[in-house]
Amino acid sequence: MNNDKTSASQLSELTQDIDRILITEIEIKNRIIEIGRQISNDYHGKNPLLIGVLKGVLFFLADLLRCITIPVEVDFLAVSSYSTEARNKGVVRLVKDLDIPIQDRHILFVEDVVDTGLTLNYLLKNLKMRNPTSIQVCTLFDKSKHRLVSLPLSYVGFELPDRFVVGYGLDFREKYRNLPFVGLLKPSVLAREMDGE
Ligand code: IMP
């Protein structure tokens, strides 16, 4: 059938590794439009600074910014995890700090996914020491079942199951970030990647 041909030809090298799509490209797009509208209302007249953590937030932040209709500024942090043990204690290493001072600024911290919350908790503590006027968090994906520290999330795009997902910025060993949707990897792919270690 023609339909089969079309879908087969659309299967890229990356999508062949996906077991199931959890959130489609259009669902993501529509939700980001809603969040952008909310942020534009809530931060009207406040010139907020949006801070993203590289690299996973790249796609979300770029799309969100274009759905915000008020003046905003943007800056980035980059972190790298220490050992698994250090990570479990919520310690991350800042490999790129902010370029813009945040004292007396309204900060909107933008995340791709909040899982245990340990990374975010560490970064929020660090930023709070710099005396911003306010800090709120916006995350596209929330895995609240896995949370180890309680964190107030002001804007949440989607609740995710407690599963490892890829796409729309989320990677598995630096791969799959450029999928336009969010999905689960095939178990055979995970096994293959593990074997390749
Ligand atoms: P947390 O410190 O456990 O909240 O971890 C947050 C970071 O773990 C995110 O910024 C992602 O880089 C990564 N992460 C958590 N869950 C996933 C997932 O399902 N896929 C890809 N990366 C994830």
Image (cartoon, rainbow, N blue to C red):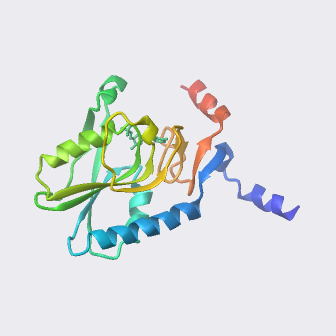
Residue in the image at 45% along x and 69% along y: 33
The answer to which quarter of the image holds residue 149 is top left
- Number of numbered markers: 0
The answer to which quarter of the image holds residue 58 is bottom left
The answer to whether one can see residue 14 in this image is no
Which of these two is toward me, 182 or 171?
A: 182
State whether residue 134 is above or below residue 142.
below
Quadrant where the N terminus sits is bottom right
The answer to which quarter of the image holds residue 90 is top left
On the image, the x and y values in percent for residue 42 come to 29, 69
Q: Ligand 1 quadrant?
A: top left
Residue in the image at 30% along x and 48% along y: 152
Residue in the image at 45% along x and 38% along y: 145
State whether residue 69 is above or below residue 125.
below
Left or right placement of residue 2 versus residue 196 in this view = right
State whether residue 116 is above or below residue 5.
above
Left or right placement of residue 178 versus residue 125 in this view = right
The answer to whether one can see residue 147 in this image is yes
Left or right placement of residue 140 versus residue 76 in this view = right
Which of these two is toward me, 197 or 62?
A: 62
Left or right placement of residue 42 versus residue 15 in this view = left
On the image, the x and y values in percent for residue 170 come to 48, 47
Which of these two is toward me, 173 or 164?
A: 164
On the image, the x and y values in percent for residue 32 come to 45, 64
Residue closest to the far right = 1
On the image, the x and y values in percent for residue 3 come to 82, 62
